[in-house]
């Protein structure tokens, strides 16, 4: 059987690229790291590293152990977190990881509901987008993930394997325009009417959704700027540098008075869902958290 402490040290060495860097990160001495790695190599029956100058390269065995060992450590951490919570019959803190626009809309609405119904509950909020957010849940770093996907985007089955998925909302996308734009004030426009515009794009996944929606409308968008900062998107549009295709949640916290939105005739939409572990949903506070998030999504 592999020693989990040795696996943790090995994962750090593999990630940092040297015994000395791993020692600094783990707050121990380099000889202690070397001793742990020699013991692990004896246990697996062969070398895991090849020295290259001042650094280290993984052998084939080391590469396989780095990949499988990290997965194993993540599973152990998540299992420990779930067992600890269930053994205690309840938890007093819920750790929520959500993408930026959910953290400024859905999560605060749900927190307001919980503060009245479960005043003893403490929430810890983390901001991250999928697939990194799923990795946090799998490692046991968070208890709940609020994630999004766009229509037609394939779901990474491996990333969410074993997780409970609770659909929250589907959002049509809208055209974000500066006040006074030629398309402003219209009830609804076809996306093709904005074909000659310059575009401000969001995160890489949002940009792929924009490219797909525009392709279905018969054109390729001229993306002049991209950013995953929602407030920066608003500022760029306000400054007249382009228009943007945004989900409805973004409209709940428009900060610039010089902005307006128009509905678009497009099948493009974003779906938001909650993910957690099936065993955790049996806990009263977790069940209350999920119910509050569903209620918040219904009001958004």
Image: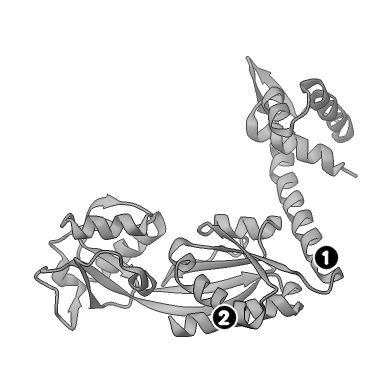
Would you identify the image quadrant in which residue 4 lies?
A: top right
Question: Along the horizontal axis of the image, is 263 left or right of 286?
Answer: left
Q: Is residue 144 visible?
A: yes
Please tell me which of labels 2 and 1 falls first in the chain: 1
**Which colour style is shown?**
one colour
The residue positioned 14% from the left and 80% from the top of the image is 186
Indicate whether 220 appears above or below 285.
Answer: above
Checking the image for residue 113, the label placed there is: 2
Image coordinates for residue 93, horizontal then vertical, percent:
70, 66
Compared across the picture, whether 269 is left or right of 287 comes to left
Give coordinates of residue 251: x percent, y percent.
Answer: 33, 72
Where residue 47 sits, quadrant-wise, is top right
Which residue is pictured at 61% across the width and 77% down the height?
115
Q: Nearer the viewer, residue 231 or 141?
A: 231
Q: Is residue 271 above or below residue 219?
A: below
Task: Specify few, some or many for label 2: CA neighbours under 10 Å numbering under 14, 14-19, or 20 or more.
Answer: some
Figure check: 218 above or below 171 = above
User: Which image quarter: residue 34?
Assistant: top right
Q: Is residue 170 left or right of residue 183?
A: right
**Residue 159 tag number:** none
89 or 224, which is in the foreground? 89
Q: Secondary structure at mark 1?
A: helix
Q: Which residue is mark 1?
A: 83
Which quarter of the rendered picture does the N terminus lie within? top right
Residue at image coords 63%, 56%: 136
**Quadrant where the C terminus lies?**
bottom left
């Amino acid at each position: 059987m592999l020693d989990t402490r040795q696996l943790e040290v090995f994962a750090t060495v593999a990630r940092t690229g040297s015994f000395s860097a791993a020692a600094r990160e783990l707050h121990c001495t380099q000889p202690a790291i070397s001793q742990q790695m020699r013991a692990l190599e004896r246990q697996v029956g062969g070398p895991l590293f090849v020295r290259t100058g001042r650094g280290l390269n993984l052998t084939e065995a080391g590469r396989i152990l780095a990949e499988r060992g990290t997965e194993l450590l993540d599973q152990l951490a998540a299992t420990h977190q779930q067992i600890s919570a269930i053994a205690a019959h309840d938890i007093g803190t819920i750790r929520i990881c959500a993408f930026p626009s959910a953290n400024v809309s859905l999560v605060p609405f749900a927190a307001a509901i919980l503060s009245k119904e479960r005043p003893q509950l403490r929430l810890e909020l983390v901001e991250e987008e999928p697939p990194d957010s799923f990795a946090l849940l799998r490692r046991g770093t968070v208890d709940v993930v609020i994630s999004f996907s766009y229509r037609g985007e394939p779901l990474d089955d491996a990333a969410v394997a074993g997780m409970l998925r609770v659909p929250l909302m589907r959002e049509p996308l809208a055209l974000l325009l500066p006040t006074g734009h030629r398309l402003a004030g219209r009830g609804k426009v076809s996306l093709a009417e904005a074909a000659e515009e310059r575009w401000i794009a969001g995160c890489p996944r949002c940009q792929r959704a924009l490219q797909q929606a525009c392709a279905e409308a018969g054109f390729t968008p001229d993306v002049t700027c991209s950013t995953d900062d929602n407030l920066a998107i608003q500022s760029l549009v306000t400054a007249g540098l382009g228009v943007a295709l945004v989900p409805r949640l973004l409209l709940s916290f428009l900060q610039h008075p010089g902005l307006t939105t128009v509905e678009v005739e497009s099948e493009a939409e974003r779906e938001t869902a909650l993910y957690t572990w099936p065993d955790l949903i049996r806990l009263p506070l977790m069940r209350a958290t999920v119910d509050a998030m569903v209620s918040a999504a219904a009001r958004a």
